[in-house]
Image (tube, helix red, strand yellow):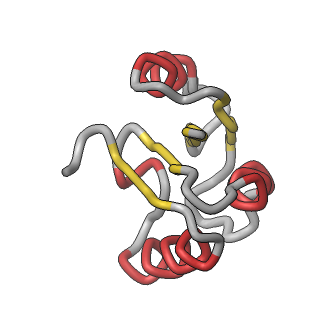
Amino acid sequence: MIHGYAWVSTDGQSVEMQRDQLTAAGAAEVFREVASGAKTNRPALARAIRQLDAGDVLLVSRLDRLARSTRDLLDILAQISERGAAFRSIAEA
């Protein structure tokens, strides 16, 4: 199953464009988050990762919609891998 994750960092932004991209790319469900990039606690991301089963894919529109730093990205990718799932970004191969 493909799970999408859409994240914006301010209330003035909308996750709708990301949601549309993710569903067009095959995401069966999209977890949406509005949270500051400075926050490390992102409940929707945690829920998305908990939903992953072996063989599932977590899909984002761009890498910067998942993580704000390389360290953050590596930590998240490790969590996804521990669940036996894969990760994919629409914009980056």
Residue at x 44% of width, y 65% of height: 68
Residue at x 43% of width, y 17% of height: 24
**Residue toward you, 39 or 72:** 72
Residue 64 lies, in percent from the top left, at: 38, 53
**Horizontal side of residue 70 vs 77, given as left or right:** left
**Horizontal side of residue 25 vs 20, given as left or right:** left
**Residue toward you, 72 or 2:** 2
**Horizontal side of residue 18 vs 47, given as left or right:** left
Name, please, the residue furthest toward the front: 55
Q: Determine which quarter of the picture holds residue 15.
A: top right
Residue 30 lies, in percent from the top left, at: 64, 32
Q: Is residue 41 above or below residue 88?
A: below
Q: Is residue 82 above or below residue 64?
A: below
**Horizontal side of residue 66 vs 28, given as left or right:** left
Q: Is residue 45 above or below residue 27?
A: below
**Residue toward you, 74 or 81:** 81
Total labels: the figure holds 0
Residue at x 54% of width, y 29% of height: 27
Residue 46 lies, in percent from the top left, at: 75, 60
Residue at x 47% of width, y 60% of height: 86
Residue 42 lies, in percent from the top left, at: 73, 58
Q: Is residue 2 above or below residue 81?
A: above
Q: Determine which quarter of the picture holds residue 1.
A: top right
